[in-house]
Image (cartoon, rainbow, N blue to C red):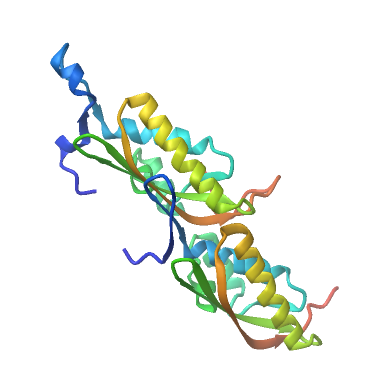
């Protein structure tokens, strides 16, 4: 993402500024809220990522995986989100995708007070979930 | 980014996009379950290894997808088992693929081109 570092921290509200002082929210906070909200949705398996590279990245403590699958744009008065996810094989994709949009919007607005302008959802793939066995791509 | 997607614009502000990989996965699953189909052309042990390390490129060559705004065109190259009537298997593949894509994505399928590459001998049961 080409955001400069001061764009990553967003003023929560101008009311806070007028009264007690500014409240600033870092973009990674929004990212965490989005991540938790999306993973709780029925039909969503995980965020998209490059399996092998992501496992290495995670091993060395880098958060790059999530950065690719979740993009946050902090605007002047609102936030926009884009997520790349993988769903379970068999669900009706448009419904789950719409649910993801709604949940992201409501969770981010609810927890940050920040209006959400756009939520883009990209379904990158679907995977079958075996009851007992693991799928070919390892998940952490 | 050269991402092939189909755009659905949802009522809430924002796009819902389906990557062509979703369509490819669906095509593979239906082909595997269609009677008379031995495999997607080109797939073999090497491809299975490629799949394990996360590269789906080899099988992707046998399956091509064109994503329009609200419809999809598919081409799939398959090997059939000896003994099956080719038009019947091809028809079963076409309708199976069309139905499953519509059922899971809501997308209409404008066409399913089937290429029958080879005939495989059935696997010997030991």
Query: Between A127 and B71, which is closer to the camera in this rendering?
Result: B71
Q: Is residue A98 left or right of residue B95?
A: left
Image position of B7 with respect to A133: above or below: below
Which residue ends up furthest to the right in the rendered image? B126
* Numbered-mark total: 0
Image position of B8 with respect to B89: above or below: above
Q: Please identify the quarter of the rendering in which residue A18 is found.
A: top left
Q: Is residue A108 left or right of residue A100?
A: left
Q: Please identify the quarter of the rendering in which residue A61 is found.
A: top left
Q: Position of residue B77 (x, y in %)?
A: 59, 81
Which residue ends up furthest to the top in the rendered image? A20
Q: Is residue A44 left or right of residue A63?
A: right
Q: Position of residue A5 (x, y in %)?
A: 16, 38
Q: Position of residue A99 (x, y in %)?
A: 51, 42
Image position of B56 with respect to A117: above or below: below
Residue at image point 79% right, 85% down: B84
Residue at image point 35% right, 48% down: A68
Query: Between A69 and B13, which is closer to the camera in this rendering?
Result: B13
Residue at image point 22% right, 23% down: A13
Q: Position of residue A24 (x, y in %)?
A: 21, 25
Residue at image point 36% right, 41% down: A60
Image position of A118 with respect to B47: above or below: above
């Amino acid at each position: 993402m080409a955001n400069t570092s001061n764009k990553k921290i967003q003023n929560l509200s101008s009311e806070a500024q007028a009264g007690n002082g500014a409240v600033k929210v870092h973009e990674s906070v929004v990212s965490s809220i989005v991540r938790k909200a999306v993973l709780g949705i029925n039909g969503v398996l995980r965020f998209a990522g490059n399996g092998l590279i992501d496992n290495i990245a995670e091993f060395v403590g880098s958060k790059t995986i999530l950065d690719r699958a979740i993009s946050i744009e902090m605007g002047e008065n609102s936030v926009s989100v884009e997520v790349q996810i993988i769903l379970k094989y068999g669900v009706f994709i448009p419904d789950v995708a719409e649910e993801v949009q709604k949940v992201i919007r409501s969770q981010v607005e609810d927890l940050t007070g920040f209006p959400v302008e756009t939520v883009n959802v990209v379904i990158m793939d679907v995977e079958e979930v075996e009851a007992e066995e693991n799928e070919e791509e390892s998940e952490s | 980014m050269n991402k092939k997607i189909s755009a659905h614009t949802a009522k809430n502000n924002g796009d819902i996009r389906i990557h062509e990989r979703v369509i490819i996965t669906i095509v593979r699953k239906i082909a595997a379950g269609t009677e008379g189909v031995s495999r997607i052309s080109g797939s073999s042990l090497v491809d299975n290894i490629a799949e394990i390390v996360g590269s789906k490129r080899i099988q992707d060559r046998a399956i091509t997808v064109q994503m329009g705004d609200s419809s999809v065109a598919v081409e799939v190259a398959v090997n059939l088992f000896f003994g099956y009537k080719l038009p019947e298997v091809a028809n079963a593949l076409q309708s199976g693929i069309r139905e499953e894509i519509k059922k899971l994505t809501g997308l209409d399928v404008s066409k399913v081109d089937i290429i029958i590459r080879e005939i495989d001998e059935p696997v010997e049961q030991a």
